[in-house]
Every structure is written in C-alpha cells, then in structure tokens.
Image: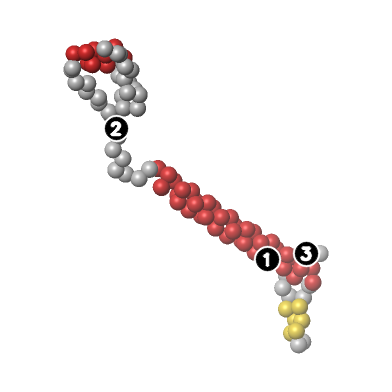
Amino acid sequence: MRRSDPPGIIAPHIPADAYHRAQTTGQPIVIVVHTTDHHGRPLSHFLYPLAVATAGAIGVFATVAALLALLDFAVHTALAIAAATGPLSVGGITFKLFDSKR
C-alpha cells in the first residue's frame, strides 16, 4: 500500500500521521472550518462617506471664515478711508462722519 500525503487544498491542516492512520483504519476524518458570518456592512462603507462629508463641512466652514475675514478687512478699510476724508458734503448739506482726533 502506497502512502499518500493529505490532499493539500482540501485539508492542509491535517497532520500527516493522523491522515495515514485514518487511511489504514478506515476511520472518517472530521474537518471543522471556523468561519465568521458577515451580516453587516464593512467599516469602509461608512468611513468613506463620513470622510467626504467631514472634508466638505471643513471646506464650507473655511469658506465662510474667509468671507467674514474679507468683509472685516473691507469694513476696516472703508472706515479708515472715511476717517481720513473728513466731513462729507452733498448739495450744501455737510455730514461729519467722524470726529477729528487732531
């Protein structure tokens, strides 16, 4: 009787002596395969949309902050120009926008 090795792709975890003993005695070999059942979605299905939404929220927040900073700069520039010009007169009516600090 020629001794053959266990089938490699079917049961690579069976020790050769247990396989040969089962072959000579005719005893059945029980193979237990532990698998996990994946019912839920993998984390990547939730992680990618969450990362895109977070990046979008940060982008919107940064855009609003930049617009507010630009508006603040424009207001300060307009106030500095208005303060430097002195009183404003239109059609004989004079408006004194700011007190002079001199």
Which residue is rendered at x = 62% and y = 58% of the image? Answer: 66
Residue 44 in percent (x, y) is at: 43, 44
Badge 1 density bin: few <14, some 14–19, many ≥20, Cα 10 Å? few
Residue 39 in percent (x, y) is at: 29, 43
Residue named by callout 3: 101
Seen in the picture, residue 94 relative to 38 is either above or below; the reply is below
Which residue is rendered at x = 33% and y = 17% of the image? Answer: 5
Residue named by callout 2: 35
Residues under numbered marks 1 and 2 in contact, where contact means CB atoms less than 8 Å apart:
no
Residue named by callout 1: 75
Seen in the picture, residue 38 relative to 30 is either above or below; the reply is below
Q: What amino acid type should be assigned to the residue bearing mark 2?
A: Thr
Q: What amino acid type should be assigned to the residue bearing mark 3?
A: Lys
Badge 2 density bin: few <14, some 14–19, many ≥20, Cα 10 Å? few
Residue sitting nearer the eye, 60 or 16:
16
Mark 1 or 3, closer to the camera: 1
